[in-house]
Image (spheres, rainbow, N blue to C red):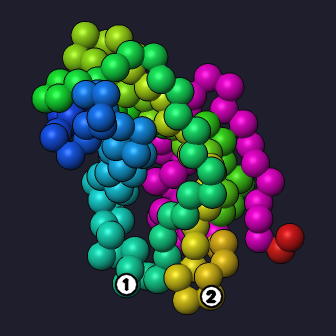
Amino acid sequence: MERFEKVLYATWRDMDYNSHMANTAYLDRAADVRMMYFAENGFTADDMLRMRIGPVVMKDEIEYFREVQLLQEIRVDFALAALAPDASRFTIRNEFTHHDGRKCAVVTSTGGWLDLNQRKLIAPPEALKKAMEALPKIEGFRALRPSIGR
């Protein structure tokens, strides 16, 4: 699959006391781009609520390279770093770059698909699994053990 990327801008609410994009803003923007990907691939937030499933993040890691300041354009991509064969667990990555391609930050998140009724990890429906599998894979992509039946 070709790269999935969105162009966003650092807004007033994204800034911290040091006049650059706050760490929590990176996490929010990463989640926004992920949900945009799912929506563009047939799984809006409403669809997920209707199916009573949702992505759940268990761990986030942020690496910083360059500052992002107010109203700067940023490009945020979405790629797969690891996936269980049943897609119940995943590690995903969002890379933030300036308009000129210079890397600003990388957000790596580990999670899975949550059954909103039973509050446990599940394998997603086949179509959602296929959407996950269609994501571009980072160099060093790896397979995870499924969480189902553990």
Looking at the rendered structure, the secondary structure element under dot 1 is: helix
Can residue 16 be seen here? The reply is yes
Q: Around disc 2, counting alpha carbons within 10 Å, would you say few (fewer than 14), some (14 to 19), or many (20 or more)? A: few
Callout 1 environment at 10 Å: few (<14), some (14 to 19), or many (20+)?
Answer: few
The kind of residue on which mark 1 rests is: Arg
Between marks 1 and 2, how big is the CA–CA gap?
15 Å
The image quadrant where one finds the N terminus is top left
Q: Give residue 112's mark.
A: none
Q: Which residues are magenta?
A: 123-148
**Residue 110 colored magenta?**
no
Of discs 1 and 2, which sits in the foreground?
2
SS at mark 2 in the image: loop
Q: Residue 57 appears at what percent x and percent y?
A: 56, 58
* Residue nearer the viewer, 15 or 73: 15
The x, y position of residue 95, in whole percent, is 43, 29
Image check: 109 left or right of 51?
right
Q: Which amino acid type corresponds to the residue marked 2 in the rendered image?
A: Gln
Q: Residue at x 80, y 54 (%)?
A: 145
Which residue is at the front of the view, 17 or 26?
17
Left or right position of 16 against 58: left
Counting from the top left corner in percent of width and height, residue 97 is at 34, 21
Who's the residue at 44% across and 25% down the image? 105
Q: Is residue 127 left or right of residue 142?
A: left
Residue 118 — which label? 2
Q: Quadrant of the C terminus?
A: bottom right
